[in-house]
Image (spheres, rainbow, N blue to C red):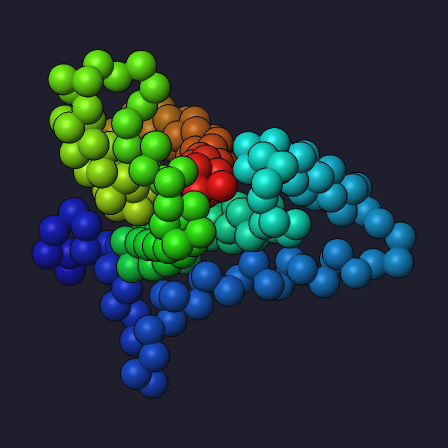
Amino acid sequence: MMTNLFSTFDPSTNIFNLSLNWSSTLLGILLIPCMFWLMPSRFNIIWNKMNLTLHNEFKTLLGSKSFNGTTFIFISIFIMMLFNNFMGLFPYIFTSTSHLTLTFSIALPMWMSSMLFGWINNTNHMFTHLVPQGTPPALMSFMVIIETISNVIRPGTLAVRLAANMIAGHLLLTLMGNTGPSMAMNMIYMLIFGQMLLLILESAVAMIQAYVFSILSTLYSSEVY
């Protein structure tokens, strides 16, 4: 029995003292063997084109001063988020990206490593980011405080943005599904049609949120070079 609206998202499925809800994070591994086919499938061709497009876009955002292979970090994050977001659309699969435990544990180390690299190797460059170009001298001290606060809360906004967007659609689907038994038969058809439309919307949100998380991570990392 649910104690509140959000208890349906709690990772509380325990068998042999193991929380099996988090196993949904690894379900994407089941789809990897198709990448090793001798003849590439259409799915493989589309996947390679998508990775190449992301690589070119992330490379442009990071700039020419970035290290080779840096884009693969953000492409891997995009793939992981995409798999987990889509897996959560299937029934009885826990959406790990709707939990701050996963999103914050990815956003915080990535932000922390970028900040340490920037402040250790490009200290003057990091100081210049605290005062935007064209700021009046009277407002410089306030801009330093504002930019510092906005920089510190970046991992939190990354984590909360992804978790909140994923849990909102799932919560709406759950609430709509719970009203089905008490509705008239002619209204159930409208409910099913509305849930199908919402599921299509959630599929788009799953792709968009994975892209937003990876692209914002790339933009934050590009500031340290």
| Residue sitting at x 33%, y 73% | 19
Q: In this rendering, does residue 77 appear at all? A: yes
Question: On the picture, is 224 further left or further right than 15?
Answer: right
Question: On the picture, is 72 further left or further right than 43?
Answer: left
Q: In this rendering, does residue 86 appear at all? A: no
| Residue sitting at x 16%, y 19% | 139
Question: On the picture, is 82 further left or further right than 45?
Answer: left
| Residue sitting at x 16%, y 34% | 145
| Residue sitting at x 34%, y 19% | 133
Q: Residue furthest left?
A: 3
Asked whether 129 or 48 is in front, the reply is 129
Q: Which residue lies furthest to the bottom in this view?
A: 16
Q: Is residue 103 above or below residue 208?
A: below
Q: In which quarter of the image is residue 10?
A: bottom left
Q: Where is residue 158 in the image (x, y as percent from the top left)?
A: 33, 42
Q: Where is residue 103 in the image (x, y as percent from the top left)?
A: 35, 52
Q: In which quarter of the image is residue 147?
A: top left
Count of marks overlaid on the render: 0
Q: Where is residue 1 in the image (x, y as percent from the top left)?
A: 15, 60
Asked whether 171 or 121 is in front, the reply is 121
Q: Where is residue 5 in the image (x, y as percent from the top left)?
A: 16, 47
Asked whether 177 or 199 is in front, the reply is 199
